[in-house]
């Protein structure tokens, strides 16, 4: 194998393998070739989360040049508006940085620097990298198809829903949302006593807890036509286009510990209203309301706002019970409702 201290040889080989060649271009070379100011090129590089280098340093390859040309082409086609470009590039950079961190961590477990030669490492990369790259492309295309179908379905539907009662504390801020907002159900699910558990569980036990939570939650959310927007430590943010769908998701999440002993106990908050989808995230007062309801919910219970309670009114599958108005940050008179299955007449 190479000298164990000769890390540069391995890094150089990895760079050539992934980018196709050794760096021969500077930042100024890239900017000149694409026909944009160097400051624009540098801003895009920063937004992707890459380490900044000097304008004259030969740190780039023709793969970097092609990537810069592609972003410029998307901008020229009008796909990227000036105020959206930086946010989109940042989102791509963050998403792939996290993915690469996890993937390389897995790969590192297969590489033994004490025994493997450089050509053995290259052979392993030849097997793994193309497979991961193809899988990523397939998953992106499948998700793109799903999003496209959902947006088309939404565009073809006639929207004649009322804006709701402007005097209602749960919907008073709805008018602040952008005109591009879409009415949807938004929910948070939070692991009960996570901070305490994180101190008492071993690292492997805590990893198992989070993995079980995220994997089963994804199954439940997907089964009812919902989407997980993001995970935030011990909490997930999810959405659904259908009121009954978001309600079923919330109920199944809190019921899951009864079916699986290693699934954590949760508290869930759901809200209904207009939300703005932006770069894979959702924004708007409805998101804040769902978060506040989650923080006030008791373990094993689903709280919903009045807007969602109104949407579910008359659905024989659910039972709703109005609770006392509560004051939380940003909402002085939030009206929560306890959600249960209609067949369950017990108190949670």
Image (cartoon, rainbow, N blue to C red):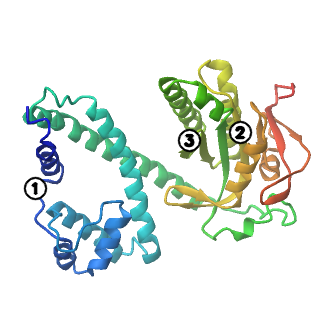
Query: Badge 1: few (under 14), some or many (20 or more) residues near its Cα, within 10 Å?
Result: some
Q: Determine whether 37 is above or below 17 in the image.
A: below
Q: Which residue is mark 2?
A: 268
Element on which disc 3 rests:
loop
Q: Which residue is mark 1?
A: 21
Q: Residue 57 appears at what percent x and percent y? A: 17, 69
Question: Which of the two labelled residues, at mark 2 and mark 3, occupies the earlier sequence position?
Answer: 3
Nearest the camera: 319 or 159?
Answer: 319
Query: Badge 2: few (under 14), some or many (20 or more) residues near its Cα, within 10 Å?
Result: many
Element on which disc 2 rests:
strand
| Closer to viewer: mark 2 or mark 3 | 3
Q: Which residue is mark 3?
A: 233
Instruction: Name which residue lies at 19% across and 67% down.
Output: 65
Q: CA distance from mark 3 to mark 1?
A: 39 Å
Do the numbered discs 2 and 3 sit on residues whose CB atoms are within 8 Å? no
**Relative to residue 220, is residue 269 drawn left or right?**
right
Instruction: Place residue 114 in its image quadrant.
Output: top left
């Amino acid at each position: 194998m190479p000298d164990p201290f000769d890390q540069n040889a391995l890094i150089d080989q990895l760079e050539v393998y992934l980018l196709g060649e050794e760096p021969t271009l500077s930042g100024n070379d890239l900017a000149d070739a694409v026909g944009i100011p160097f400051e624009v090129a540098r801003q895009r590089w920063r937004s992707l989360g890459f380490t900044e280098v000097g304008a004259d340093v030969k740190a780039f390859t023709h793969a970097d040049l092609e990537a810069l040309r592609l972003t410029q082409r998307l901008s020229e086609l009008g796909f990227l508006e000036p105020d959206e470009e930086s946010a989109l590039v940042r989102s791509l950079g963050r998403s792939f940085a996290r993915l690469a961190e996890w993937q390389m961590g897995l790969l590192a477990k297969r590489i033994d620097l004490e025994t493997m030669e450089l050509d053995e490492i290259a052979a392993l990369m030849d097997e793994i990298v193309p497979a991961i790259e193809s899988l990523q492309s397939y998953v992106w295309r499948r998700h793109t198809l799903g999003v496209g179908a959902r947006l088309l379905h939404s565009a073809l539907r006639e929207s004649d829903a009322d804006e709701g009662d402007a005097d209602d504390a749960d919907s008073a801020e709805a008018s602040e949302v952008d005109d591009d907002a879409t009415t949807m159900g938004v929910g948070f699910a939070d692991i009960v006593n996570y901070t305490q558990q994180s101190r008492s569980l071993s690292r492997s036990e805590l990893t198992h807890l989070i993995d079980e939570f995220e994997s089963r939650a994804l199954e439940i959310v997907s089964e009812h036509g919902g989407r997980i927007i993001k995970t935030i430590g011990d909490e997930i943010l999810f959405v659904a286009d259908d009121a009954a769908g978001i309600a079923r998701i919330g109920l199944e999440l809190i019921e899951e510990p009864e079916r699986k002993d290693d699934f954590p106990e949760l508290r869930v908050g759901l809200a209904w209203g207009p939300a703005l989808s932006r770069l894979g995230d959702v924004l708007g007062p409805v998101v804040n309301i769902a978060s506040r309801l989650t923080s006030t919910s008791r373990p094993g219970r689903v709280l919903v706002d009045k807007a969602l309670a109104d949407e579910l009114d008359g659905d024989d599958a659910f039972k709703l019970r109005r609770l006392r108005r509560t004051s939380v940050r940003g909402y002085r008179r939030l009206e929560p409702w306890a959600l249960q299955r209609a067949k369950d007449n017990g108190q949670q």
